[in-house]
Image (tube, rainbow, N blue to C red):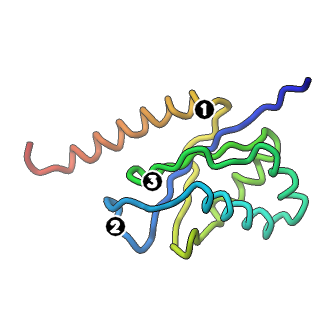
Amino acid sequence: MVRHKNRYIVTSISDIDKEENTPLTLKPASLHVAINDKVQQLYGDFGVAAIRAGFTAKYCNEQTRIAVIRVRHGPHRFVTSSLPCIKTIEKKRVILNILYVGATIKQCFKFLLVYQQRKFDQFCSKLKTD
């Protein structure tokens, strides 16, 4: 039996038309389809066949606009290079930024914990009163 290594990609999704504080209604399946279509456009059938095994959108949070994507090690380069090129998901104009690429989902959630704490501290520093 062969062990397949995975990579987990943490991305932030920014909606151009909405404010940053409003929740983003996004399904993991629609993110999966958008990434699959962009890889098809950039790399053709070879890219889609390379990422097909083990490729899923594991986690999408509407409030924090964070998504975690799992893909096999090796073809993860196709996904990471195509993520910044995605401009629309479900007919919404979006910008995707790669925050972190990790080998385990546990490390990704550790990163997210620190990232969210930093964002919370930035939010609190902008408040005018206690």
Give the crowd class for mark 3: few <14, some 14-19, many >=20 residues within 10 Å: many
Looking at this view, name the residue that lies furthest to the top: 1
> Could you tell me the amino acid type at mark 3?
Arg
For disc 1, the marked residue is 105
The numbered dot on residue 80 is: none
Q: Position of residue 91 (x, y in %)?
A: 55, 76
> Image height check: is 1 above or below 94?
above
Give the crowd class for mark 1: few <14, some 14-19, many >=20 residues within 10 Å: some
Give the mark nearer the N terminus: 3 vs 2. Answer: 2
The numbered dot on residue 19 is: 2
The image quadrant of residue 115 is top left
For disc 3, the marked residue is 65
Could you say whether the residue bearing mark 1 is in a helix, strand or loop? helix
Q: Position of residue 39 (x, y in %)?
A: 77, 62
Residue drawn at x 62%, y 57% is 29
Residue drawn at x 50%, y 60% is 26
Q: Position of residue 12 (x, y in %)?
A: 50, 53
Observer-nearest residue: 42 or 3? Answer: 3
Q: Is 84 situated left or right of 3 in this image?
A: left
Q: Is 102 situated left or right of 122 in this image?
A: right
